[in-house]
Image (tube, grey):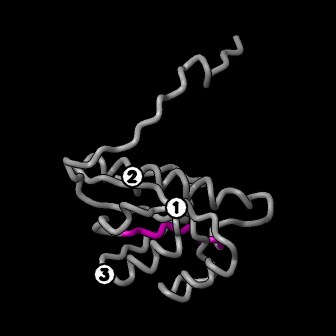
Amino acid sequence: MARHTPSVCNRQPWHVHAYHDNAIKQKLLNLQGGNNGFGHTSDWVLVVTSNLSSFLNVKERFEVYIDGGLFSMSLMYAFQDIGLGTCALNWCAKPSKDKKVRRLIKIAEEEEIIMLIAVGHFNENVQAAYSEKRSISEIITNHE
């Protein structure tokens, strides 16, 4: 389902690296660092990347993140549609940490890490945090 995500000029620069091995998953989650208390329960850890060589010049410097982010969202919705839970795990890493992940899972230099996604089956006994959503009037300004 997610492969139908729109992208600039239909370049489809994304790639998913999927890990099920517990040792690799734990190393990735430790490097990501924002999953304490639940990361270890995920069945899979995905690393979503976008290929920098898909973009032509400096004017397109943000497209790698826009297209990768749109694809990641579509992927999370697709998993939800088939009954799996996901958790977006940000990748705001210093270059040294980025290099450690690249060495660990052998990501090519032209691939930019967009984010990690934890994927697994829902545990019915777990309470998930919920934040009240902003009203439509707070997020839309109608310029008639």
Residue 51 in the magenta stretch? The answer is: yes
Task: Looking at the picture, tell me which residue is in the foreground, 123 or 107.
Answer: 123
Does residue 20 show up magenta in the picture? Answer: no
Residue 46 image-quadrant placement: bottom left
The earlier-in-sequence mark between 2 and 3 is: 3
Q: Which residue is mark 2?
A: 76
Main secondary structure type of the part rendered in magenta:
strand
Please tell me which residue is depicted at 64% across the width and 69% down the height of the picture.
93
Q: In the rendered view, does 103 fall on the left or right side of 125?
A: right
Q: Residue 37 occupies which quadrant of the picture?
A: bottom left
Q: Label 3 sits on what residue type?
A: Asp
Q: Secondary structure at mark 1?
A: loop
What number is the disc on residue 21?
3
Three-letter amino acid code of the residue under disc 2 = Met
Q: Residue furthest front?
A: 37
Q: Crowding at label 1, few (<14), some or many (≥20) Cα neighbours within 10 Å?
A: some
Quarter of the figure with the C terminus = top right
Q: Are marks 3 and 1 in contact (CB under 8 Å)?
A: no
Say what secondary structure mark 2 lies in.
helix
Which stretch appears magenta?
Answer: 45-52
Whether residues under marks 1 and 2 lie with C-beta atoms below 8 angstroms apart, the answer is no
Q: Disc 2 and disc 3: Cα gap in Å?
A: 20 Å
Q: Give the residue at mark 1.
A: 12
Q: Which comes before the other along the chain, label 3 or label 1?
A: 1
For image coordinates 46% across by 50% down, the residue present is: 73
Left or right: 93 in relation to 59: left
